[in-house]
Image (cartoon, rainbow, N blue to C red):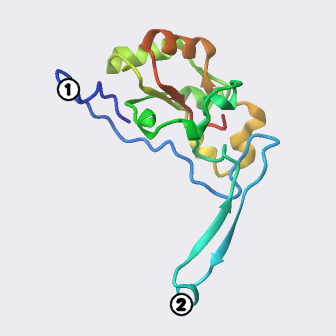
């Protein structure tokens, strides 16, 4: 995960370890209750017969690693086709709450977690994506454990409001269902 302050002049690029918070897309990936299920079928089975191998996938837009756009929760909010690629390229910081989440499944990233992160790694850059590493990705192979009766880590409302008002972030990311 990067803790960089940008590549601009006067800023030194800091490097951290790489943490893969993505979820592998699978037909049986855990979905928010009530979501339509996806499917995959092999359309071109052999290179010898068809010249290539290929599958056709049908999936719900909120499956595995995905982005919730403003239009997902805000009437009149922008949808994915209205967001430019350039808007998605952001510095990223990852706040690790995995030890606490192992004990407290419904824990939240708090303002204290964010301040502690900044004391250790420096100020969260304006426009950054602030991602949470709760360790929940390890449960992604088991839908029941991943959904966990809708008890899983997230960001507190107060922490999100602080990030928006005080750090002017570009977004948040989670490794959980939602």
Location of mark 1 (residue): 12
Residue 113 appears left or right of 119: right
Quadrant of the image for the N terminus?
top left
Q: Is residue 129 above or below residue 112?
A: below
The quadrant where residue 46 appears: bottom right
Towards the viewer: 166 or 153: 166
Q: Position of residue 22 (x, y in %)?
A: 52, 45
Which mark is first along the chain, 2 or 1?
Answer: 1
Task: Give the side of residue 159 with respect to residue 75, left or right.
Answer: left
Task: Name the quadrant of the C terminus.
Answer: top right
Marks 1, 2: nearer the viewer: 2
Residue underneath mark 2: 48
Q: Position of residue 95 (x, y in %)?
A: 46, 26
Where's residue 124, x and y in %? 38, 19
Q: Residue at x 78, y 44 (%)?
A: 35
Asked which quadrant contains residue 77, the reply is top right
Residue 17 visible in image: yes
Identify the residue at image location x=62%, y=47%.
Answer: 64
Looking at the rendered structure, the secondary structure element under dot 1 is loop
Q: Which is nearer the eye, 81 or 122?
A: 81
Of 31 and 8, the residue lying toward us: 8
Residue 83: x percent and y percent?
52, 35
User: Quick check: 129 left or right of 40?
Assistant: left
Residue 17, by quadrant, is: top left
Q: Check disc 2 and report its element: helix, strand or loop.
A: helix
Say if residue 152 shows up in the picture.
no
Characterize the local packing of mark 2: few (<14), some (14-19) or many (20 or more) Cα atoms within 10 angstroms: few
Q: Is residue 79 above or below residue 61?
A: above
């Amino acid at each position: 995960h990067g803790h960089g302050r940008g590549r601009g002049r006067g800023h030194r690029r800091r490097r951290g370890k790489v943490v893969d918070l993505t979820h592998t897309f699978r037909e049986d990936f855990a979905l928010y209750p009530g979501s339509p299920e996806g499917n995959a079928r092999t359309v071109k089975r052999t290179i010898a017969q068809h010249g290539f191998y290929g599958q056709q996938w049908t999936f719900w837009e909120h499956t595995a690693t995905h982005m919730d756009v403003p239009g997902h929760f805000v009437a009149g909010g922008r949808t994915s086709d209205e967001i430019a690629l350039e808007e998605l390229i952001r510095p990223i910081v990852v706040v690790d709450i995995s030890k606490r989440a192992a004990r407290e499944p419904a824990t939240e990233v708090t303002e204290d977690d964010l301040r502690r992160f900044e004391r250790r790694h420096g100020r969260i850059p304006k426009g950054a994506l602030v991602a949470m590493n709760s360790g929940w990705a390890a449960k992604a192979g088991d839908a029941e454990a991943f959904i966990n009766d809708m008890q899983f880590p997230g960001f507190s409302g107060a922490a999100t409001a602080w990030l928006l008002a005080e750090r002017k972030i570009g977004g948040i990311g989670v490794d959980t269902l939602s």
